[in-house]
Image (tube, coloured by chain):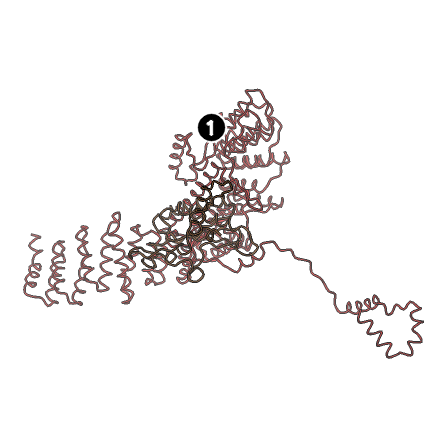
Chain colours: A red, B brown
């Protein structure tokens, strides 16, 4: 090392003579004072006295860490079109119906491509992707094995061909070959999952059971459910699953489980319970999924609240005896069944929560949703204390969730409903901020649930917030996240009215047209009445008049929209206030055409405007029109016209006729 | 390569040679196969006509204006030194152009631009607003899915629509 040498040299130079004498002695004796190791040790001791150096542990970053960091600097752009669509004004949806139409047509295009790819696999098998991408290869759709064997049965099960699998199984039994237990169980799972029908392939029409499906859809429509429920199937008596199950020599718990869960899924609840008693008689034990299915079926078996709760407790006790551990879905089904147990729910729901806590199972959003439903009945406004939901939201603040239960997606919309019912704005903001944490927006559900959530949030804002904040939110969430329905637009109009910002009405009318709500007559009439109610400054009146003309053109363009007296008079008033005489006159003629009678106030208004703009001919025409309507105000009008206008003699004579005319007619 | 060998002069020479060799009846004659040529001074140039033919900016500028007034229609890195696969990319481009022309029949307003970023293929096209938007989306979903499965890489379509073709000049 350089340091010790320097020291040595220095030392020798200084104490040269002394060293020469002692050098031999020193090197003879071990002389470890000058070896580099010792010098180093000396240096280390010197350093350690200052502070310890802590070398941090190496951090391992994921491969997308840089991308995630960059993404966190970019927030949602409220002016951008939804990412599924092309970035072009012609191709972007403006109403919720268009949104659905475009996304569905894009999906059907993809389905058409998949159909071609799967039916012509030979063009798509060349694999040059490194590494291999399995989702871009054609899927095998056609059956390869045709002989009667267990492998063929397994193939049909993997390809989800229910009827073909059942046929193959029957053929195997007839041929006398025994099918392994494993395969039989899988076959039973398949049949019970799809309720003995082939799953609907994309692009293939549903030929079988078309009439039955039609009947079911009619029944469902009468119940007023949404389109998704049309696909609910019903378990038929003695279908293939039951037949195969009865033919089995020994039935183990997995077979029972498949049948019970299938029956519960497709609506045969009492059968499920009788099968469960069979299972108990055969001294078998069910698994946690079977118990979950049975608990969710309890409200459909028993009618009285306490009977339901007794059955649930009985099932839970049996679960305990059979040493089956409950999971999150067990507790969620208990709470869901409790929702239909009326007053008992308020006692037993907290107990269920305590059980969950004792077992260390973390609740999911579905749990919270069930609790909210138990404690906050919908539609009942009044002194509902919001303590429970406040505590809940404080506890959940900043947590990000994943979807663990299909019912999770209903939490946010029901929480917002409670905020709306109790008119609590702070709570609404809290719920919204929870949605914005991390990936929680995924738990808002499909587009319908999302529109419900944002609709309620927007109504709450319109009701409670100052108009500037409302407009800020309006630009933020509409139309990128939410296409308002007519009720939402009405709430916005009311908010504008409350805060006296009626000058924004023409811009709102433009938005109403873009959203496709300009065919809703009552919304348009409300807009017109708000505009025509009071006098405003001249620029505002000009913009209102332009808006009124626009409304008129919309009415004229659509044959389905009918003018009413109030809308006609509002439009005329607005045009008069902006001194647009010619257009106002056209409106009066429109009155005649639509067989509606203008009001006296309107005609007086018209006359005064005529006077201020100096159009005596118009005034005479007006009196003639009034006479044509046989209005009782005609003589008054004639008198004022005669008095205030500069008329020619001819006009005077016409008017004086009208002064007297009505008395004659009444006789 | 092909251009230099198959200029018309040398073609005539070679066919003359072939004929002469046939006359001499020699067995060592080898005929030269000549493909259809497109001379450099006629490629991608629309000639002046009566003045009623509308041209887009792309069509109006000749190929020597690429990198001066025009950009490239196909962007990939295979032409850099040491990078392979230029021929395969060209064949893919030809297929994609024909596919787009056929799928969006009558709707293309201009040439299709193909960009390769990473392993992604971005196909950019200008369309006319001839179809209602839902039909556009059907075709877009279909093309993206089919091309992705064909080329085993994500394919994205970037569509912009116009009312009419953007005319640059009339020739």
State which chain disc 1 sits on: A
Residue at image x 8%, y 52%?
Answer: A666
Residue holding disc 1: A236
Q: Is residue A473 left or right of residue A540?
A: right
Q: Is residue A652 left or right of residue A61?
A: left
Tell me what residue is drawn at x 17 percent, y 55 percent: A589
The spot of residue A277 in percent (x, y) is 57, 28
Residue at image point 27% right, 64% down: A542
Indicate whether B80 appears above or below A162.
below
Residue B53, how many percent across, how many down?
A: 31, 55
Q: Nearer the viewer, residue A216 or A271?
A: A216
Of residues A386 and B99, the one nearer the viewer is: B99
- Residue A538 position, x and y percent, is 27, 67
Q: Is residue B85 toward the left or the right of residue A556 in the image?
A: right
Element marked by disc 1 = loop
Q: Is residue A126 above or below residue A429?
A: above
The residue lying at 92 percent from left, 78 percent from top is: A18
The answer, for residue A43, to whether it is visible in the render is yes
Image: A17 above or below B26: below
Residue A661's quadrant in the figure? bottom left
Q: Position of residue B161 (x, y in %)?
A: 37, 53
């Amino acid at each position: 090392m350089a340091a010790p040498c320097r020291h040595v040299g220095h030392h020798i130079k200084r104490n040269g003579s002394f060293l020469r004498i002692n050098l031999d002695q020193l090197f003879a004796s071990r002389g470890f004072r000058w070896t580099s190791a010792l010098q180093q040790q000396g240096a280390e001791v010197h350093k350690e006295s200052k502070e310890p150096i802590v070398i941090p542990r190496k951090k391992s970053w994921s491969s997308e860490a840089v991308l995630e960091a960059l993404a966190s600097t970019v927030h949602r752009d409220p002016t951008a079109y939804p990412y599924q669509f092309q970035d072009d004004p012609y191709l972007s949806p403006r109403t919720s119906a268009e949104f659905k139409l475009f996304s569905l047509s894009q999906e059907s295009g993809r389905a058409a491509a998949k159909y071609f790819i799967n039916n012509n696999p030979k063009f798509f098998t060349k694999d040059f992707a490194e590494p291999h991408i399995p989702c871009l290869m054609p899927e095998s759709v056609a059956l390869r094995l045709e002989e009667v064997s267990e492998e063929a049965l397994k193939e049909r099960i993997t390809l989800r061909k229910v009827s073909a699998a059942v046929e193959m199984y029957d053929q195997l039994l007839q041929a006398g070959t025994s099918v392994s237990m494993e395969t039989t169980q899988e076959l039973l799972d398949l049949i019970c999952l799809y309720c003995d029908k082939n799953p609907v392939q994309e692009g293939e029409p549903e030929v079988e059971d078309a009439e039955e499906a039609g009947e079911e859809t009619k029944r469902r429509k009468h119940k007023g459910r949404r389109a998704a429920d049309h696909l609910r199937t019903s378990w038929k008596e003695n279908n293939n699953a039951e037949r195969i199950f009865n033919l089995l020599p020994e039935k183990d718990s997995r077979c029972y489980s498949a049948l019970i869960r299938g029956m519960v899924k497709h609506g045969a609840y009492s059968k499920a319970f009788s099968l469960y008693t069979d299972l108990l008689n055969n001294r078998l034990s069910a698994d946690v999924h079977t118990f979950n299915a049975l608990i969710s079926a309890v409200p459909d078996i028993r009618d009285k609240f306490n009977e339901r709760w007794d059955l649930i407790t009985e099932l839970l006790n049996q679960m305990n005896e059979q040493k089956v551990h409950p999971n999150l879905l067990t507790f969620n089904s208990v709470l869901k069944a409790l929702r239909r147990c009326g007053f008992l729910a308020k006692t037993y729901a907290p107990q269920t929560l305590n059980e969950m806590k004792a077992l260390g199972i973390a609740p999911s959003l579905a749990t919270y949703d069930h609790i909210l439903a138990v404690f906050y009945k919908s539609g009942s406004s009044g002194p509902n204390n919001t303590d429970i939901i406040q505590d809940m939201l404080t506890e959940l603040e900043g947590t990000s969730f994943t979807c663990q239960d299909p019912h999770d997606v209903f939490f946010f919309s029901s929480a917002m409903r409670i905020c709306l019912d109790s008119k609590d704005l702070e709570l609404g903001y809290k719920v919204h901020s929870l949605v914005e944490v991390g990936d929680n927006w995924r738990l808002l559900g499909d587009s319908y649930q999302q529109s419900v959530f944002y609709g309620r949030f927007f109504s709450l804002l319109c009701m409670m917030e100052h108009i500037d904040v409302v407009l800020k939110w309006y630009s933020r969430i509409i139309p990128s996240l939410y296409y308002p329905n007519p009720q939402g637009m009405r709430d916005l109009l009311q908010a504008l009215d409350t805060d006296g910002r009626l000058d924004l009405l023409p811009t709102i009318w433009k938005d109403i047209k873009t959203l496709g709500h300009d065919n809703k007559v009552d919304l348009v009439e409300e807009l017109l009445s708000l505009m025509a109610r009071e006098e405003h400054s001249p620029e505002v009146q000009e913009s209102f008049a332009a808006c009124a003309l626009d409304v008129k053109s919309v009415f004229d363009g659509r044959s389905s929209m009918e003018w009413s007296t109030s809308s006609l008079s509002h439009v005329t008033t607005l045009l008069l206030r902006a001194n647009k005489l010619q257009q106002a006159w056209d409106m009066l003629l429109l009155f005649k055409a639509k067989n509606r009678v203008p009001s006296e106030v309107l005609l007086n208004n018209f006359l005064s405007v005529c006077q201020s703009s100096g159009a005596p001919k118009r005034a005479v025409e007006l009196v003639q029109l009034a006479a044509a309507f046989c209005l009782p105000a005609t003589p008054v009008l004639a008198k004022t016209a005669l008095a205030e206008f500069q008329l020619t003699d001819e006009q005077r004579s016409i008017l004086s006729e009208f002064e007297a005319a009505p008395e004659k007619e009444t006789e | 390569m092909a251009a230099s060998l198959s200029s018309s002069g040398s073609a005539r020479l070679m066919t003359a040679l072939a004929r002469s060799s046939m006359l001499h009846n020699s067995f060592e004659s080898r005929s030269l196969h000549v493909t259809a040529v497109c001379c450099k001074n006629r490629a991608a140039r629309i000639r002046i006509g009566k003045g009623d033919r509308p041209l887009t900016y792309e069509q109006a500028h000749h190929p020597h204006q690429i990198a001066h007034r025009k950009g490239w229609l196909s962007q990939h890195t295979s032409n850099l030194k040491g990078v392979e696969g230029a021929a395969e990319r060209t064949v893919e481009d030809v297929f994609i152009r024909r596919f787009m022309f056929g799928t969006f029949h009558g709707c293309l307003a201009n040439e299709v631009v193909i960009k390769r970023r990473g392993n992604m293929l971005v196909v950019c096209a200008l369309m006319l607003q001839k179809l209602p938007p839902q039909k556009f989306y059907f075709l877009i979903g279909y093309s993206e899915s089919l091309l992705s499965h064909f080329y085993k890489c994500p394919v994205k379509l970037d569509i912009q629509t116009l009312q009419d073709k953007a005319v640059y000049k009339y020739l």
